Image (cartoon, helix red, strand yellow):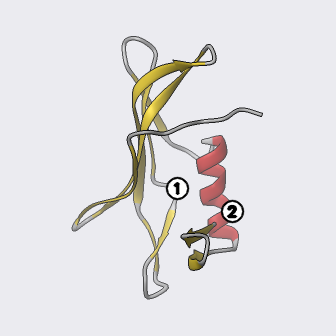
Amino acid sequence: MKGVLGRVFTLFNERGAEMDQACLVTFLSEAGGIFTFRENDECQSFATTGRTAVGMDGCRQQVRWSAYMDNYNIVDGIRQPNRLRAVWHYDEGDLVYFDSDNLRLEYR
């Protein structure tokens, strides 16, 4: 996983088995987790303990992680969330590290 600010400054560039597992959770959501759905069948959240957080000091720890989906719209006949939040649930409090209220998904 690579994070770049303004297409110029690399913030992080993580590799390895733990990142591979985190990617599997992110893309396939099959490394153990709980999906929560609303009564109208919209996916509300996905939570897992199968992710490793890497601190600024390089320290690695297993931390509960959640993705929250909200504000669904129909785009090209597909119901998709307009808002997505990704949250690390640390013992000392939650860290929201991604929060988009105007998410656009493209299918190719």
Mark number, residue 16 = none
Q: Give residue 86's position: percent from left, percent from top.
A: 42, 51
- Earlier in the chain: of badge 2 and badge 1, it is 2
Residue sitting farthest toward the bottom: 57
- Where residue 46 appears, as percent x and y from the top left, is 46, 39
Mark 2–mark 1 contact, CB under 8 Å? Answer: no
Mark 1 is surrounded, within 10 Å at the Cα level, by few (under 14), some (14 to 19) or many (20 or more) other residues, namely many
Would residue 11 appear left or right of 7 to someone viewing this image?
Answer: left
Q: Which residue carries the number 2 mark?
A: 20
Q: Is residue 9 above or below residue 53?
A: below
Q: Amino acid at mark 2?
A: Asp
Q: Secondary structure at mark 2?
A: helix
Residue under the image location 65 percent in, 45 percent down = 27
Quarter that holds the C terminus:
top right
Tell me the residue at 69%/69% (across/down). 17
Q: Element at badge 1?
A: loop
Q: Is residue 50 above or below residue 44?
A: below
Decide which of 51, 94 is in the foreground and name it: 94
Q: Looking at the image, which residue is at 66% across and 51% down?
A: 24
- Residue 18 sits in which quadrant? bottom right
> What is the C-alpha distance between the residues marked 2 and 1?
11 Å
Residue lying at 60% horizontally and 36% vertically, measured from the top left: 105
Q: Which residue, given by chain and number where applicable, does mark 1 sit on? A: 50
What amino acid is at disc 1? Gly
Q: Nearer the viewer, residue 65 or 84?
A: 84
- Give x and y (percent) for residue 1: 63, 66
Instruction: Measuring from the top left, give residue 81's x and y in whole percent.
Output: 47, 30
